[in-house]
């Protein structure tokens, strides 16, 4: 893999005179010689919200409220920049650093498995095995390389460039910058799906809409229903009874107010867990809730902190404090929708 340190200067200029810009994310992008970059991409991670820079290096992304996602800046031949939780109404001045080509530090071993077999595992675990997942096409799959370690019983996948995924079933092209992919097995020298005990992938994504026909929109609605984003939006709005979600604890049905205080604050919704276990600090807080959607789709969420925030899109802060299991985790990239889906 490539390990390159970025050097970037970001300046913030508060804009009070322009009410339109003050509600958006905007700025200017320059190269290392202080020249504006034409055609650089600025986008909100996991959404279809993005912009290309003009001749002055200026970009603007329309966002209606504060968000928990990152602002990502990319340009061919330059290092990607990630800005956590960008602020509305602040002008960003961003300097990109040219990408330094370095030798790949992953040693590709003589695998006992064929590339075709490892690619099949990758697609099953990354794209998923739903109709949508199976119809996805990775247009540059030749950029993916694999490493299998028999000692740790683990298959890993890497790519030095964003994967370009055509999803005709949901009408999107997804650009996914893969930062981690691994599948762990209970036994060595096997890629048997029945012997997988965990699979993990992470990265950042950008969506471009390719189809808006009525059939595709209905498919998107079905993909959204019962998803983590759907759950978080309804939790934020305390709207469970109408949308089919139910919360159970110790076998008994309950309502959100029995577990959370829900408070609007600074463009975000703050949720604080109630019934904190006695004699425990927030450092080792843990609470598990059972979630059921439409009476038969069962999942669990384990919280390891008592407070978190949900934004307008249903994105929540501090992903590491929540552990999901069950149906909520079944959907993979093939069923993924932009985080701003259904938001005007």
Image (tube, rainbow, N blue to C red):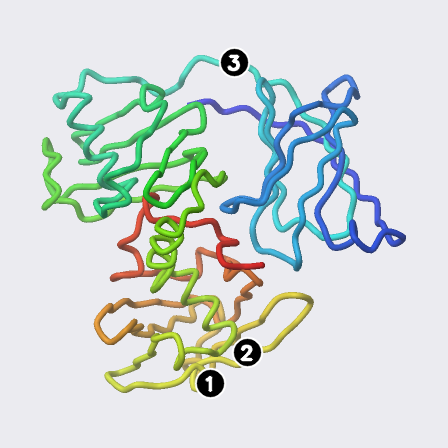
Cα separation between marks 3 and 2: 48 Å
| As drawn, 18 above or below 115 | below
The answer to whether residue 176 is left or right of residue 92 is: left
Label 1 sits on residue: 257
According to the picture, the residue beneath numbered tag 3 turns out to be 101
Quarter-of-image position of residue 258? bottom left
Looking at the image, which residue is at 39% across and 61% down?
A: 228
Q: Position of residue 215 (x, y in %)?
A: 35, 51
- Write the residue at 65% across / 53% down: 63
Q: Is 18 rendered above or below residue 202?
A: below
Viewport quadrant of the C terminus:
bottom right
Q: Residue 28: where, in percent of width, then height?
A: 76, 33
Q: Residues within 10 Å of mark 2 (few under 14, many from 20)?
A: some
- What secondary structure is marked by label 2? strand
Residue carrying label 2: 262
Labels 1 & 2 near each other (Cβ < 8 A): yes
């Amino acid at each position: 893999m490539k390990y390159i340190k970025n050097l970037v200067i970001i300046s913030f200029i508060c804009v009070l005179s322009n009410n339109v810009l003050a509600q958006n994310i905007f700025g200017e992008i320059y190269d290392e010689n202080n020249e504006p970059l034409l055609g650089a991409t600025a986008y909100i991670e996991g959404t279809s919200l993005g912009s290309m820079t003009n001749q002055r290096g200026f970009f603007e992304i329309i966002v209606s409220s504060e968000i928990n996602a990152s602002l990502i800046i990319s340009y061919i031949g330059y290092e990607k920049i990630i800005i956590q939780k960008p602020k509305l109404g602040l002008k960003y001045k961003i300097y990109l650093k040219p990408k330094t080509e370095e030798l790949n530090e992953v040693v590709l071993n003589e695998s006992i498995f064929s590339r075709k077999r490892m690619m099949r595992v990758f697609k099953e675990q990354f794209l998923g095995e739903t109709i949508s997942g199976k119809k996805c096409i990775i247009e540059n799959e030749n950029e993916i390389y694999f490493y299998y370690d028999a000692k740790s019983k683990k298959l890993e996948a890497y790519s030095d460039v964003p994967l370009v995924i055509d999803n005709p079933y949901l009408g999107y092209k997804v650009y996914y910058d893969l930062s981690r992919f691994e599948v762990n097995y209970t036994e060595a020298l096997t890629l048997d799906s029945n012997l997988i005990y965990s699979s993990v992938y992470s990265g950042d994504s950008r969506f471009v809409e390719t189809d808006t026909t009525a059939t595709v929109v209905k498919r998107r609605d079905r993909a959204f229903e019962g998803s983590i984003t759907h759950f978080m939006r309804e939790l934020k709005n305390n709207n469970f009874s109408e949308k089919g979600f139910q919360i159970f604890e110790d076998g008994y049905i309950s309502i959100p107010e029995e577990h959370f205080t829900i408070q609007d604050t600074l463009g975000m919704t703050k949720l604080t867990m109630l019934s904190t276990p006695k004699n425990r600090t927030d450092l080792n807080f843990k609470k598990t809730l059972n979630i059921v959607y439409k009476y038969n789709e069962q999942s669990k969420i384990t919280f390891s902190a008592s407070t978190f925030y949900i934004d307008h899109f249903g994105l929540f802060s501090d992903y590491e404090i929540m552990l999901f299991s069950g149906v909520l985790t079944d959907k993979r990239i093939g069923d993924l929708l932009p985080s701003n889906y259904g938001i005007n």
